[in-house]
Amino acid sequence: MIRSGRLGVGIIGAGRVGPVIGAALGGAGHAVTGITAGSDPDRVEAVLPGVPVLPADEVVRRSELVVLAVPHAELPALVEGLAELGAWQVGQLVLHTDPSYGVDVLAPASARGAIPLAVHPAIAFTGTSIDLRQLRDSYAAVTAPGAVLPIAQALAVELGCEPVVVSEEARSAYGEAIATATEFSASLLRQSSELLAAAGVEEPGRYLSTLVHSTVDRALQGLDAS
């Protein structure tokens, strides 16, 4: 376990990522203290049953570890806004899940004594419990100041991931790589699915699933061997 053991974990962001991260950390023995409101409360309740829905500043106040799982464009203003409210606490762990940012984006929290961590699990989140199984077979990019890098790595392991250290300077390149792979594959899958539907194939997404997985596995084996 991390530091003294069980942590109170608060989740800011109730989209596809935040609730799953909370559930994974809860499964590792931590206590989820609260989550902010989202557009799909039934889905959040299914992943994090019984967890109170709270304003962001209250989530921060209750938590030793705060997970920020919000859209890329919203993260800087969120961190700064909570700093202006005096929400961040000395010694509190603050972790964001965005692929493109390192820990510099958390500077307003760090300036008030919080410990900044960046951990990006490299999976395509669905926002359901299926993601918990995916996490167990995935990697996570971790970025943190040297003294607390082991904390970020340990949290990645508790999520079920194998941690891969990415430097602050390389974080934007890492984010670009993730975006390129995700957008390219999504575009091709949409096109293939439309063609299969036009050909009369029912449930084209399911039809493509096995094919895509085997094709990607072969392609990645080739890259690793080169």
Image (cartoon, rainbow, N blue to C red):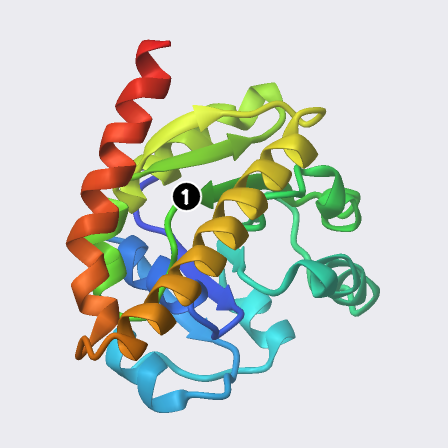
Q: Residue at coordinates 25% horizontally, 39% vertically from top-left?
A: 215
Where 50 sits versus 133, above or below? Answer: below
- Observer-nearest of 49 and 121: 121
- Amino acid type, label 1: Ala
Where 103 sits versus 95, above or below? Answer: above
In the picture of the structure, the residue carrying the numbered disc 1 is: 122
The answer to whether residue 28 shows anywhere in this view is no
Hey, which residue is sitting farthest top in the picture?
226
Instruction: Answer with left or right where residue 6 lies relative to residue 116.
Output: left
Based on the displayed image, in which of its 4 quarters is residue 21 positioned?
bottom left
Look at the numbered disc 1 and give the secondary structure of its residue: loop
Residue neighbourhood size for the residue with mark 1, other residues' Cα within 10 Å, grouped as few (<14), some (14–19), many (≥20):
some
- Give x and y (percent) for residue 36: 52, 78
Looking at the rendered image, the quarter that the N terminus falls into is top left
Q: Residue at coordinates 78% horizontally, 60% vertically from top-left?
A: 83
Based on the displayed image, in which of its 4 quarters is residue 85 positioned?
bottom right
Where 46 sits versus 220, above or below? Answer: below
Looking at the rendered image, the quarter that the C terminus falls into is top left
Q: Residue at coordinates 49% horizontally, 61% vertically from top-left?
A: 63
Instruction: Answer with left or right where residue 210 lies relative to residue 199.
Output: left
The answer to whether residue 217 shows anywhere in this view is yes
- Give x and y (percent) for residue 115: 61, 40
- Observer-nearest of 193 and 118: 193
